[in-house]
Image (tube, helix red, strand yellow):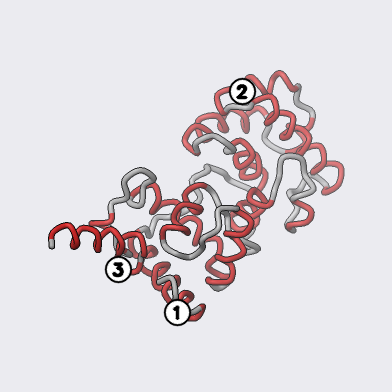
Amino acid sequence: MSRESKARKRERANRVFDLLLKEHPDAHCALDHRNAYELAVATVLSAQCTDERVNRVTPELFRRYPDPAALAGARQSAVEEIIRSTGFFRNKAKSLRGMARKVVQRHGGEIPRTMGELTELPGVGRKTANVILGNAFGLDEGVVVDTHVNRLSNRLGFTKERDPVRIERELMALFPRERWTHLSHLLIFHGRRTCVARKPKCGSCPVASLCPLSLVKGSLVQASLA
């Protein structure tokens, strides 16, 4: 597959998408949230932390601080105590309070809906902004590239890049805009369930026939049996 044309790669990539959609019909954003504010907070907390851990912490955080105005007025130490188990809690608490203040001061207490405005908020980079735009507002502005998306994009031969920004750019060129948000969910779910980091389950993978890694592994097995 190293010599496949751009058109063939795009066709293969979208066949992979269709197969993963059938395999993981429940793929979705794993961060519990009811609105854009809660998703923004949860996404900031998810840095270097599992979604499961974040989901254990946010109910109390949202009970105490149900909107940006409440969080903007929170004491640093109080926020730190609630989110301590998510790691890097001092920096995260500072970012959350700063984000909330800016949302109140510049956006009337409403989470903004553009990439430029979101990335101006403390603690919000392009990845976090993509999560918010795609899942809270239904706006496909980019592809969220986490560790699972990074790993699977390389294994599936969609890219040879390791830098998230470059990976995102290549994925955006392969898939139609309306698939960008859900693509991340599918790759993340598949990365957790089948294409795991240490020992991918190629034998039970629905896209094995379209995956360079699986085909290489199969060739090596055949060679060893010859």
Q: Which residue is mark 1?
A: 8
Q: Is residue 41 left or right of residue 174?
A: right
Q: Which numbered disc, 3 or 1, marks the residue that appears first in the sequence?
A: 1
User: From this viewpoint, which residue is outermost toward the right?
Assistant: 105
- Residue at disc 1, secondary structure: helix
Nearest the viewer among 104 and 189 is 189
Above or below for 185 versus 56: below
Residue position for label 3: 209
Question: What's the distance in space between the residues labelled 3 and 2, CA to CA?
Answer: 46 Å
Q: Label 1 crowding class (10 Å Cα cut-off): few <14, some 14-19, many 20+?
A: few
Dot 3: element: helix
Which residue lies under the disc numbered 2? 82
Q: Amino acid at mark 1?
A: Arg
Q: Earlier in the sequence, mark 2 or mark 1?
A: 1
User: Could you tell me if the residues under marks 3 and 1 are in contact, i.e. CB atoms within 8 Å?
Assistant: no
- Point 32% across, 50% down: residue: 200
